Image (tube, grey):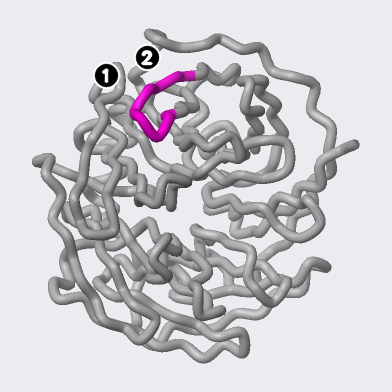
C-alpha cells in the first residue's frame, strides 16, 4: 500500500478534486482554438518506483531539480537525462513545492510542516515551522531576497536564507493558499482554492484578494508572465486565467474538456501549463493562442529549462519529461 494513503492531505483534497472536476465555467472566457503542436517529448523514468514527482525548477547549476512527494526525495536531472536522488532526512516528509533562492540553493516545502534547503552537492537542511499542521505547498523566491511559501492552513510564510521564519495570516476565511509567484509589482501573488480568489500579498504581510467569476474555479498554479501580468490555472473550470497587477481578470477556456490544469510556468513562447487529467502539456501565448502536446502519465509541475526546453513532472507515470519546442 502506498504510504501516502490515509494521510489527511489526500483524504480531504482528492474528493474535492473529483467533485469540482465536474464543474465547468464558461462565463467571462475567451474560447481560443488550439494551434498545431510542434515539438519533441522525451521522458525519463525515475530510479525510485512510485515516488510521485511533484514540483520542479531549473537550478542555478544548469540542472533541473524536483520533489518526489511519496518517495521523500529531492531529485536532480541533467539536461541529458541523468538522474540523482537525495533522501530528505525526515521520514514521510512529503516534499512538494520547489524553487531557487537568492543564496544559490534550492528550497522546497514539506507538507508535514518543514521548509527544506538543498545545496548543489545534495546537502539538505530542514527548518521546522512553528505550527506543523499548516501544510506548506507553493514556494517562490521573493522580491526581498527571502523565500516565501503558501500554507494550505491559511498563511503566507517567509523564511530568510539563514532560516528565520515569519508567518502572516490571510484575511479570507477559509483560506487554502496553494500556488505562489513573485509578481512584477514587488508583491507575492497566490491562488486561494477555498474562496476561488487570486491573492496579492506585500512583503510586509498585507494581503488583498480578487474574486474570480465563480468561487468554484479551484485556482492552483500561478506564474508571472513576460507581459507583466500573472497567469494561473483554473482546475475545475478548465481555464487559464490572466490577472493584471491592478486586478483585472481575463479567462481562456481550454480546448480539452476536464483536463485538470495544474502547474504553470513562464517560458519560451508564453506560459506553459500541465493538464493532469488529460495527459497533456499546454502553451498559451500572451495573446491567448493555445497549443497542446500529449505526454504519458499525469503531468503536474512544470518549469522552463536550459536552451528553451520545458521540463515537467509526471506524477502517476513516475517520470520527468522534457519538451523541446519546434521551430
Q: Name the residue rendered at 65%, 73% in the picture.
A: 60
* In magenta segment, residue 187: no
Please give the range of residues in magenta.
Answer: 243-251
- In this picture, is 56 found above or below 195? below
First reached walking from the N terminus: tag 2 or tag 1: 2
Q: Is residue 192 visible?
A: yes
In three-dimensional space, the C-alpha distance between marks 2 and 1, rounded to whole angstroms, equals 8 Å
Badge number at residue 25? 2
Q: Is residue 15 visible?
A: no
Q: Position of residue 226 (x, y in %)?
A: 61, 40
Residue 31: quadrant of the picture: top right
Q: Is residue 260 left or right of residue 37?
A: left
- In this picture, is 238 found above or below 12? above
Badge number at residue 214? 1
The label nearer to you, 2 versus 1, is: 1
Q: Name the residue rendered at 33%, 36% in the picture.
A: 17
Residue 92: quadrant of the picture: bottom left
- In this picture, is 42 found above or below 64? above
Cβ atoms at labels 2 and 1 below 8 Å apart: yes
Q: Position of residue 133 (x, y in %)?
A: 16, 66
Location of the C terminus by quadrant is: top right
Q: Position of residue 296 (x, y in %)?
A: 67, 44
Amino acid at each position: 500500500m502506498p504510504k501516502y494513503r490515509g494521510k489527511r492531505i489526500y483524504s480531504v483534497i482528492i474528493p474535492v478534486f473529483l467533485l469540482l472536476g465536474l464543474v465547468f465555467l464558461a462565463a467571462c472566457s475567451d474560447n481560443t482554438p488550439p494551434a498545431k503542436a510542434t515539438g519533441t517529448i522525451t521522458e525519463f523514468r525515475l530510479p525510485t518506483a512510485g515516488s510521485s514527482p511533484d514540483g520542479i525548477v531549473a537550478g542555478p547549476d544548469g540542472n533541473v531539480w524536483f520533489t518526489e512527494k511519496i518517495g521523500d526525495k529531492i531529485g536532480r536531472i541533467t539536461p541529458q537525462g541523468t538522474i540523482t536522488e537525495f533522501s530528505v532526512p525526515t521520514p514521510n516528509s512529503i516534499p512538494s513545492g520547489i524553487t531557487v533562492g537568492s543564496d544559490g540553493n534550492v528550497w522546497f516545502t514539506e507538507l508535514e510542516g518543514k521548509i527544506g534547503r538543498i545545496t548543489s552537492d545534495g546537502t539538505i537542511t530542514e527548518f521546522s515551522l512553528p505550527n506543523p499542521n499548516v501544510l506548506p505547498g507553493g514556494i517562490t523566491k521573493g522580491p526581498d531576497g527571502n523565500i516565501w511559501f503558501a500554507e494550505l492552513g491559511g498563511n503566507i510564510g517567509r523564511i530568510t536564507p539563514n532560516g528565520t521564519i515569519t508567518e502572516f495570516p490571510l484575511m479570507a476565511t477559509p483560506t487554502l493558499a496553494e500556488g505562489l509567484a513573485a509578481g512584477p509589482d514587488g508583491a507575492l501573488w497566490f491562488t486561494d482554492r477555498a474562496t476561488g480568489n487570486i491573492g496579492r500579498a506585500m512583503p510586509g504581510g498585507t494581503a488583498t484578494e480578487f474574486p474570480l467569476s465563480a468561487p468554484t474555479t479551484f485556482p492552483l498554479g500561478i506564474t508571472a508572465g513576460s507581459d507583466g501580468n500573472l497567469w494561473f490555472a483554473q482546475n475545475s473550470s478548465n481555464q487559464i486565467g490572466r490577472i493584471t497587477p491592478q486586478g483585472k481578470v481575463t479567462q481562456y477556456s481550454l480546448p480539452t474538456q476536464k483536463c485538470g490544469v495544474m502547474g504553470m510556468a513562464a517560458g519560451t513562447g508564453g506560459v506553459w501549463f500541465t493538464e493532469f487529467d488529460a495527459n497533456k502539456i499546454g502553451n498559451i501565448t500572451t495573446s491567448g493562442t493555445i497549443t497542446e502536446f500529449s505526454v504519458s502519465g499525469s503531468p503536474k509541475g512544470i518549469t522552463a529549462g536550459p536552451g528553451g526546453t520545458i521540463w515537467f513532472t509526471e506524477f502517476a507515470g513516475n517520470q520527468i519529461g522534457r519538451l523541446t519546442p519546434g521551430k
